[in-house]
Amino acid sequence: MEFSIKRGSPEKQRGACVVVGVFEPRKLTRGAESIDNIAHKHLSDIIHRGDMEGKSGSTLLLHNVPSTLCERVLLVGLGKEKEFHEKAYCAAIRSAVKALNETGATDGTIFLTENPVKKRGVSWRIRQAAMIAQETVYRFDQFKSTASEGIRPLRKLSFTIERRESLAQAEEALAQGLATAEGVSLARTLGNLPGNVCTPGYLAETAQQMAKEHAMECQVLERADMEALGMQALLSVARGSHIPPKMIVMQYKGMKVGKGSDKATSGKPIVLIGKGITFDSGGISLKPGLEMDEMKFDMCGAASVLGTLKAVARMKLPINLTVIVPTTENMPGGSASKPGDIVTSMSGQTIEILNTDAEGRLILCDAMTYAERFNPETVIDVATLTGACVIALGHVATGLFANDDGLAHKLLQAGDDAQDRAWQMPLWEDYQDLLKSPFADMANIGGRAAGSVSAACFLSRYCKKFAWAHLDIAGTAWKSGADKGATGRPVPLLVHYLLTRSGKLN
Ligand code: BES
Ligand code: MN
Ligand code: ZN
């Protein structure tokens, strides 16, 4: 789809559809009013007949509105004016794009971006609108023999701004929103692909292709390389599968070390690590059958860091970013790890594997030790790590753990701003005892109580040398039920964080 920023009045627009808002109860916004005035109160009449109350999310499509130059006018309910905050704004954009997409209109001019949103400026409104529009038209139908849509698809969308002075700013916000959306879309597609297609090898190929496109370095460690490095924790997870594990390492260099605008990091890279279990059967500690298909989503952490990198490369942000993806299947098999096995991780710390289903931490810990060689300024890992995190936070917030309060604060703020929120959980020493093992340095599970905290505690033992945060996306990476599918979270949070770090937000 093509996007642009426009200025002008709704009643003077040509084209297939103009989109304006109505507040509840029955109150026209300024944009709607200007159409109403030229159209001899056509909109007022309709509203007073009771066809458009203005409830948040509702829409009404009108054809041939008198004296207008466009083919259609789409009215979008915004809810109560004094409750028109971020959530209502996003809902309105979503319903507008959805309704547009369901009509025969191939282009639309959306005036909703002119409505003030408390605490949020024009850049935020445009960035968010671009992201939501792309998210709304996203489809994953590559495995359907017949395409789902019959109607003409939406090809062009314009968002309007009120003031000429904000044009440059709005254009930049649009580009940022679209880059983020591209990252989200990549993350969703990788997540949605079935486990027999999206294997560790497939992820590695995707990474190599992306590296070529954006002139980045990409290295793929094979099983033999991992053996040489002593990554026995990661390898212990891969042992049950017939397909080989990979460790993908990508380096984006947006600035020269010691120079450049990113004074904060002085050229040291920010490292993102994503859990890439392309299917999690649980291994010998086999999972129950119900909904096991959803464990194809266990590589959504990997997908999200690749998506984030894609967005950063597209915007050419002046930062250095390294992405590490340890990836393998977790399967039962004759050579698979057994409960009670003890392995030595790359760091030298020994682990008693009490449950082979707690595999995410085993692949992440070796990736974290490997990250040390990049002398990172910050390390952030993203993982569908624990069912316990879903019990704690549901499907609303991502679980955030950090050994650095400044970093935690910045990520929470980024999540808030990008409408992709996280909630901080404790990482106190008191919880470390949960991981005691009579035979090894630690066990790989800490029992049912505080399951997401003990998982984070496990990871913290591998992150003593740098500022580190862990995002548990078990509840937010995908949706179950009727609209089953990957969400692309937390790409918006991460991209927003990196935009802030590179001083590119206005
Ligand atoms: N990938 C799962 C976590 C998960 C489960 C995410 C359900 C989303 C929905 C992870 O590898 C896992 O199996 N974790 C175990 C840990 C336990 C054995 C300590 C869990 O959460 O049950
Ligand atoms: Mn598991
Ligand atoms: Zn898992």
Image: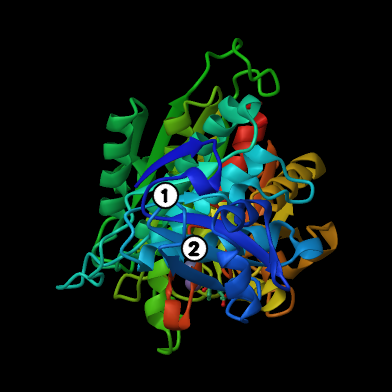
Q: Is residue 174 left or right of residue 428?
A: left
Q: Is residue 397 left or right of residue 158?
A: right
Q: Nearer the viewer, residue 122 or 421?
A: 122
Q: Position of residue 28 (x, y in %)?
A: 67, 62
- Relative to 1, is 237 above or below? below
Q: Nearer the viewer, mark 2 or mark 1?
A: 1
Q: Position of residue 124 (x, y in %)?
A: 65, 43
Mark 2, residue position: 74
Q: CA distance from mark 2 to mark 1?
A: 14 Å
Q: Is residue 367 visible?
A: no
* Mark earlier in primary sequence (2, 1): 1
How many numbered discs, if any?
Answer: 2
Mark 1 Cα shell of 10 Å, populated few (<14), some (14-19), many (≥20): some
Q: Quadrant of residue 32?
A: bottom right
Q: Position of residue 499 (x, y in %)?
A: 61, 34
Q: Quadrant of residue 56?
A: bottom right
Residue drawn at (35%, 57%), measured in percent from left and top? 190
> Could you say whether the residue bearing mark 1 is in a helix, strand or loop?
loop
Name of the residue lying farthest toward the front: 40
Marks 2/1 in contact by CB < 8 Å: the verdict is no
> What is the quadrant of the C terminus in the image?
top right
Mark 1, residue position: 69
Q: Is residue 108 visible?
A: yes
Q: Is residue 228 left or right of residue 73?
A: left
